[in-house]
Amino acid sequence: MGSILLAYAIGTKYIEDPYMVSLVIIVITLVLLVLAYVITRSFDRLAEANRMKSEFVSIVSHQLRSPLSNLKWTLDLLLSERVDLDDKKELEYLKILEENTQRMGNLISDLLTVSRIEQGRFTPRKESISLNELINKIIEEAKVFSKAVNAEIIFKSGENLPKIFGDPSQIKMVITNLLDNAVRYTRNRGKIDIGLSQKGKNLYFEIKDNGVGIPQEDSKYIFQKFFRSQNVLKEQTNGSGLGLYIAKSIIDKAGGKIGFKSQQGSGSTFWFSLPLK
């Protein structure tokens, strides 16, 4: 406003034509608005980069510190002579070592996948895929995990669905991430509905749970790297905040679309569609 008033004062002093003065003020106003927008966007990007850096440090340090602490504690116990361990006890401790090693391995794998995506080296291969068979296989692999939290998985598929062309390992990664989230954040005796159907020239996948849901204010961040909702953090579940970012990158690369709808406390529904050709 100060610049506009100053331009008006100078314009009226040196330019006699009032229309020309108005034109100069309009031009200056537009230039100032563009500069303000650019500067504001720059600060927004800096703030977002700083937030993501803080989340990266927080999440990665937490996800590594917890399993490392468990590993150290278990190894110290196994190497000490303070307790007598029978075969059954030793097996339990070895399982603890295996689980925590797997947690760190999963985190490192996700970080490497994100690195490959951002460097443009995450190129999918093309082959014929039966999504129906792939989903059934993933559900079978998740049975132990789902039973542990008393979650029931129900899969309904359309008849005679055509195959798609894509990378089976990458599509499997997407479905596994979505199913893992649904199981992880569902409540006791939860229900997870999975559907597969054809919509026009696309195959449409949908997974619905009755878990904790996503707060409205967090919706715009869901597919960003390292982001985890505050209500999810309260559940004390493991996770790097990379699964949905990776899933979206894969679906976008395959020419499909991905999205969700959710209400806090009432569960979430995630979906994606993939072109048939």
Image (cartoon, grey):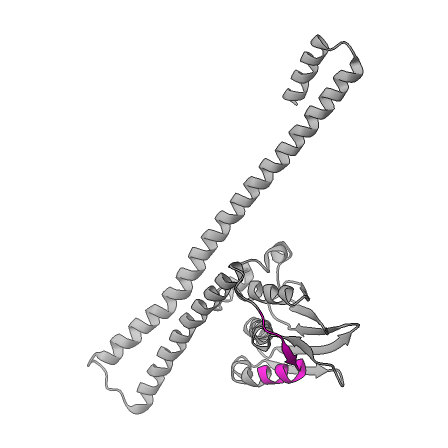
Q: Total number of numbered labels?
A: 0
Picture quarter with the N terminus = top right
Residue located 59% across and 83% down the image: 139
Residue at 30% across, 91% down: 87
**Quadrant containing the C terminus in the rendered view:** bottom right
Q: Is residue 111 above or below residue 187?
A: above
Q: Is residue 277 left or right of residue 94?
A: right
Please provide percent x and percent y for residue 100. 39, 74
- When the figure is inspected, residue 32 is found, relative to residue 134, above or below; the finding is above
Question: Dividing the picture into quarters, in which one does residue 167 lie?
Answer: bottom right
| Any part of residue 207 in sight | yes
Is residue 227 shown to the viewer in this render? no
Does residue 133 show up magenta in the picture? Answer: yes
184 or 123, which is in the foreground? 123
Residue under the point 68% across and 24% down:
28
Which residue is painted at 33% across and 68% down in the image?
69
Identify which residue, 196 or 194, lies in the foreground: 196
| Residue ranking furthest to the bottom | 87
Res 33 quadrant in image: top right
The part of the chain drawn in magenta is 124-138
Residue 275 horizontal/vertical position (percent): 72, 71
Estimate the x, y position of residue 143 in percent, counting from the top left. Answer: 55, 84
Does 231 sit left or right of 165 as displayed? left
Residue 208, given in percent of the width and then of the height, sits at: 66, 73
Q: Does the magenta segment cover residue 189?
A: no
